[in-house]
Image (spheres, rainbow, N blue to C red):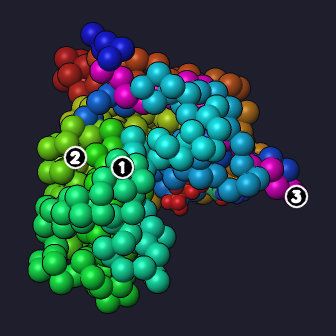
Amino acid sequence: MLQEKDILLELNDYSITFATPDGEVKAVSNMNLTVRRGERVAIVGESGSGKSQTFLGIMGLLAKNGATTGQALLEGKDVLSLKPRELDQIRGKDMAMVFQDPMTALNPSLKISRQLTEQLEVHRGLTARAASDAALDMLKRVGIPDPTRRFHLYPHELSGGMRQRIVIAMALLTKPKLLIADEPTTALDVTIQAQILDLFNDLTAEMNTALVMITHDLGVVAGLADRVAVMYAGRIVEEAPVDELFDNPAHPYTAALHASIPRPDQDVDDLVVIPGRPPNLQHLPKGCNFSPRCSQVQNDCIDRPPPLETLAPRHCAACYHPFPRREELLNHG
Ligand SMILES: Nc1ncnc2c1ncn2[C@@H]1O[C@H](COP(=O)(O)OP(=O)(O)OP(=O)(O)O)[C@@H](O)[C@H]1O
């Protein structure tokens, strides 16, 4: 049974809209999600499904034309209702975000040393000396070779992989309770990607930091997350522990994503592609957002959006006609 003290983040009926000259864009619709302390949750979906905006909204970093409704409770406190100064206190201390491009977080004109120590002095009130020791120690932990020398370099003097390690060090320095990683390895080459993902795993586990990993690639979440939430056109369509999601995908969109993961023994020509395109967020379908592309669509799917319902312990899907569980299929021959 999930106890209140175990819950770190709770989204309740959380929505994001953007006002544009052509009308309202509904980027995130009525989202409910819980992240426990120390848990690793992957948020998976195609480009434009609302993954990044969901968490930018929680961090108070939406574009000016964006607005949120509902609640985002961090340790019971609604971060959506905080004043900018109060949010500043929490951001960087209790929750931090790492992006695909490390340069979004680094100031090109400041040495690494300054960028790392500044927040320790501001948020933790450390002396310059103590902040410098702590920052150097963190550089060692994120695997920066020769950290004392690199400490005094500018960002452009480092490789992309090194810069991303610096950003991770920066995000973890204040020991946040929640770390949001938005496609943190997409810009890096494959070997470095694996190292960086290991680093996220090891350090967040060591600090009991909850990790939200945003990715478009369902193929990378095994081993990286405890639980997966699949998003489509601004809604969570399925949520389950990672093994359960792979063994028993219930939503036709998850099943299609699953089938489109390239396998080593497969020809490129045999890759499954989901036909059609996601809906326009200004004119969402009346029923299920996936219904225009869904292979299982029936009349009720077109009438009203399916609610997220529990199918098995900790496994929910928003579908009127979910795929049966594997054991049900076996029992029925
Ligand atoms: N300032 C804005 N004004 C209008 N629409 C916006 C604005 N910012 C984002 N959007 C829209 O919100 C939707 C969700 O975007 P979001 O970045 O969350 O998608 P995503 O799933 O993270 O995809 P990606 O991986 O491409 O970033 C997109 O369709 C995007 O066009």
Which residue is rendered at x = 18% and y = 84% of the image?
Answer: 149
The relative height of residue 110 versus residue 125 in the rendered view (above or below) is: below
Question: Is disc 2 surrounded by few (<14), some (14 to 19) or many (20+) residues within 10 Å?
Answer: many
Quarter location, residue 235: top right
Looking at marks 3 and 2 on the same chain, the residue that comes earlier in the sequence is marked by 3
Looking at marks 3 and 1 on the same chain, the residue that comes earlier in the sequence is marked by 3
| Kind of element beneath mark 3 | loop
User: Which amino acid does the dot numbered 2 rest on?
Assistant: Thr
Which residue is rendered at x = 45% and y = 67% of the image?
Answer: 105
Which residue is rendered at x = 22% and y = 46% of the image?
Answer: 204
User: Which amino acid does the dot numbered 3 rest on?
Assistant: Pro
Residue 204 in view here:
yes
| Kind of element beneath mark 1 | loop
Q: Nearer the viewer, residue 133 or 155?
A: 133
Looking at marks 1 and 2 on the same chain, the residue that comes earlier in the sequence is marked by 1
Residue 234 in view here:
no
Which residue position holds label 1? 125
The relative height of residue 80 versus residue 100 in the rendered view (above or below) is: above
Residue 268 image offset from top left, x and y in percent: 31, 72
Marks 1,2: beta carbons within 8 A: no
Quadrant assignment for the N terminus: top left
Magenta segment main secondary structure: strand
Which segment did they paint magenta? 6-22
On the picture, is 324 further left or further right than 197? right
Which residue position holds label 3? 21
Tell whether position 21 is magenta: yes
Residue 196 image offset from top left, x and y in percent: 22, 64
The label on residue 204 is: 2
Which residue is rendered at x = 30% and y = 85% of the image?
Answer: 153
